Each structure stands twice: as C-alpha cells, then as structure tokens.
Image (spheres, rainbow, N blue to C red):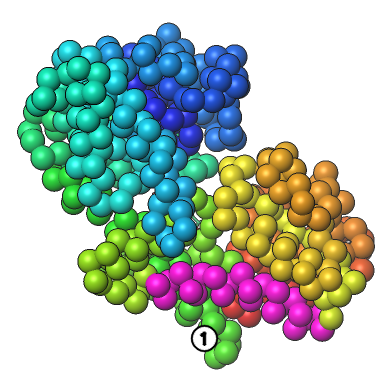
Amino acid sequence: MNVAILGTGYVGLTTGACLAYLGHQVYCVDADPKKIEALERGEMPFFEPHLADVVADAKENLRFTTEYAQAIPAAQVIFIAVGTPPGPGGAPDLRYLEAAARGIGEYLGPHFTVIVNKSTVPIGSGNWVDSLVRDAFQKRGGSRAGGSFAVASNPEFLREGSALGDTLYPDRVVVGADEEPTAEVLYTLYRPILEQTFTAPAYLPRPEAIEAAPLISTDLASAELIKYAANAFLSLKISYINEIGLLAEKVGADIAQVAKGMGLDARIGTRFLQAGIGWGGSCFGKDTAALVATAAEYGLHMPIVMAAREVNKKQRERVVDKLLGELKILKGRTIGLLGLAFKPNTDDLRDAPAVDIAKRLIERGARVKAHDPVAMDRFRQEHSNCEVLLCASAEEVAEGCDALVLVTEWPEYRELDWESLAKSMRSAFVLDGRLVLDRTRLSRAGFRVSGLAG
Ligand code: UGA
C-alpha cells in the first residue's frame, strides 16, 4: 500500500521504517529540511536501537520529503505522527496536529484515503481532524461533502529504547474506526504483523512466544481512551510500588522482594513494579495530565491518577532528601549522577529525572557531575544553561565525589569497577535510584549503599 507518515519523531519514523520493511511504499514527511537531509544520508535524528538497521533494510520502499504535495496525493493511508507536547494547564498543544490535518485536506488524492491519528491525541480528536481535513479540502474547491476519506485511531504502544521490537512484535494492535471499510484498510496494512508472516530481521528475531498479534477493533473514542488508560495505569503501577516503598523503608522490608512477591500473582504481573526514582519521558507525565484535563472538561475528578502524579514528583525530591540525610550539608559537596536519559537505550531527556535532580542539587549549592553513554550531546544542546560538569566516563564522575546517584539503569553501570570507584571518591556513598546494583558487592567494595526505599 502507499503510505504517508507525517512527523519523523520516535513514533513516525519507527512506524514508517517498519511499514516499509514489511513491503509498503512509505513517504516520511517532516517540516524540518535538516532532518530530512540527514535521514536521506542514513543518519537518525535520535538514538534508538536498530532504527538505522531497519531504515537501511527498507530503503527501497522508504522516501523522505518536506513536501506534503509529494507524499499525500497518492497515499492510501496517512499517519499523523506529529508532536503533541504538553500545553499550559495539562492539555496537549495541538497546533502541529491541526497544521497536519489542514495540509492533508489541501493535497488529498481522489481515491478513498484513511487518515490515522497515531500521535496520542485527546479523546474526540478523530472528529476534529475529520472536520479540519474537510474544511481544507473544500477551500481548495473540493466538493461540499469533502473528499473520500475517513479518520481512524491507531494508538501506538512502543517504548523508547525498544521501539522497533514493540512495533514488529506488539502485544496487540488497536484500530478505532467508526465504519468497517476504514478498519479493513488498516487490517490489510497490518496483516503481516497481525499474522506474523514477515521475515524477522536477524538483529531483531521474533520472540518465541509470538505467533500472532491480537487485534482490538473498536470505535474511535474507545481506541483513543485505550491509549490514555494504558499509560495512566502503567504510571500508577510505578507510583504504587514507590508508595509501598516508603512504608517498606519504615518497617524494614525489602521493596524488591515485596514487588516480586506481589508481581508473581498473575493478576498483578511483575512488570512496571521496579521501585525507584519514578517515571520520566514524554508520555506518562503528559498523558496523565491530559487525562485529568479531559476528565475535568466533563466535570470529573480523577484522584487516583492525580495521586500517581504527586507520588512521582515526590520521588525526585526524595533523592535530594536522601543525600541531605547522608551528607548533612549539600553546599559545597560534589554529587555524581550516573545516567541522564529518562531511561536506558535512549538519548531522550524530556522530563528526565536527572535534569530535575541536577537542578535541585545545584540550587542547594552542590556541584554536579554526570555521565550518560548516549545522552550527553543532547544534554549540551538542550540544557546549555544547566551547570552540570559532563564527564567522559563513570570513573571520571566518581573522582572526588561525596556521593554517586544511579539515575538511569544503563546495564554497563552495574559492571563498573566499583572497588576502584570507591577509592577515588571523597566519601563512598551510592544512592541506587533504580534498585539495580549488587549491594553485597558494593558493600564489599567499601560503599555505603542506599535505595530510595531504604
Ligand atoms: C511509554 C509506554 O510504556 C508505551 O507503551 C507508550 O507507547 C509510550 O509511553 C508512549 O505513550 O509513547 P516510554 O515512555 O517510552 O513508553 O517508556 P517506559 O518504558 O514506559 O518507561 C517510562 C518511565 O517509567 C521511565 O522513566 C522508566 O524508568 C520508568 N519506570 C518504568 C519505572 O520507574 N519503573 C518501572 O517499573 C518501569
């Protein structure tokens, strides 16, 4: 099928690359000419494992452009995957979505086209996009009834850092459309994923358990709400275990064991019960805020979701409190942060706990050093006024520090030569913000170790 993808962020580029890999003819469109030129040279705009490999493998089927006029007219399916950054008051800023919808209306081809909302958009956006496309189509002299198109919702559930695997081997595919022919187009598009009939890339083998991906075919509003309900639930799972962690510390319980003991109940599940600094990134904070804002428009209060947000915010403050408890004075101390990105395997710094923590420590007069395997360039670009001393290695961070904080659980941090790190520090204290370090080994190396829950 002919596909156009508007927006080359994590969602757009991953979706475009995977659909092209499956054999569809894909145009990826982005307003930024520099980004498009770089993509044409095979350079990825962000760090995401295997994205460059899939783009290279699919290059026969994948084109990049800044022009809607090139991508839209022939497209049978158009994905809107533009950014919906948080706006003031919690509701997302929809200006890019609006511009994309108008642009589609201006260039829509004569055949039936399915326009898919892939970005996480507020509930009800499907209808709004429909009217924007129709208006733009009429303005250019189209018929009053508008072009032959329909809007569908197809939320994505990919995680940064494992975006390609999540797209090729999803837990489920959700298609929201108010009419059957619209949904049919998307089943055809996704058939190789739904039936798992494509040849798996050698670098991303098909997990053994996967034979087919379940399809949830529903109406527009339900598909839109599924995305928010899923993200908010994952957020509150994390905040729940962090809240239990507070009590675990008081009663002397081991939160990792508590999480495991809880999670092995199949009704609960072990994933997203990793206690620690809490969530960051572009999704959970934004989507929980948007859900609360949407509910408020209907006169509804969402105390559970709001509590999850509050608990998450406090976890970052607890990092500073813990350091204060250990060091007594923060002014003049040197604190080393291991990890800047909001999670491992990405260089994304949006709502990254490390940035927040660094700022709070600097405000209190501490000196902050940091390392991240891939996010330091981005940190230099996006946080040039944040006075963090970036170091080429974790060893360099540790030198002369009063405390280390493990903020992002990059696997390589577990394997550090902790014995020599302890020797190079002014005081060998480590705050394991993700509960991933081997405490026995670190204690043997001479460290005092603490987590956020004791
Ligand atoms: C999240 C969802 O997991 C995806 O399904 C969804 O598609 C995406 O948002 C989106 O809406 O676009 P993502 O934000 O990329 O994906 O990353 P996650 O792996 O969900 O991690 C989010 C944050 O939660 C990270 O900061 C991570 O460190 C934290 N986390 C995760 C915990 O603190 N504890 C856990 O047990 C799990």
Q: Quadrant of residue 17?
A: top left
Residue 447: in sight, yes or no? no
Q: Residue at x 41, y 41 (%)?
A: 95
The magenta segment: 306-328
Please name the predominant secondary structure of the magenta segment in the image: helix
Q: Residue furthest bottom?
A: 251
Residue 260 at x, y = what percent? 45, 69
Name the image quarter holding the N terminus.
top left
Q: Residue furthest top?
A: 60
Element on which disc 1 rests: helix
Picture layout, residue 418 above or below residue 453: above
Amino acid type indicated by mark 1: Leu
Picture layout, residue 447 above or below residue 13: below
Q: Nearer the viewer, residue 287 or 141?
A: 141
Picture layout, residue 302 above or below residue 251: above
Left or right placement of residue 384 versus residue 105 in this view: right
Q: Nearer the viewer, residue 163 or 140?
A: 140
Neighbor class of circle 1 (other Cα within 10 Å; few <14, some 14-19, many 20+) is some
Residue 164 at x, y = what percent? 44, 34
Q: Nearer the viewer, residue 221 or 269?
A: 221
Picture layout, residue 198 above or below residue 313: above
Instruction: Confirm whether the magenta stretch covers residue 22.
Output: no
Name the image quarter holding the C terminus.
bottom right
Q: Residue at x 84, y 71 (%)?
A: 365
Q: Residue at x 14, y 25 (%)?
A: 146
Q: Nearer the viewer, residue 180 or 147?
A: 147
Q: Quadrant of residue 187?
A: top left
Residue 236: in sight, yes or no? yes
Q: Residue at x 77, y 69 (%)?
A: 363
Name the residue beneath numbered marker 1. Answer: 247
Q: Quadrant of residue 379?
A: top right
What is the total number of numbered labels drawn onto the structure image? 1
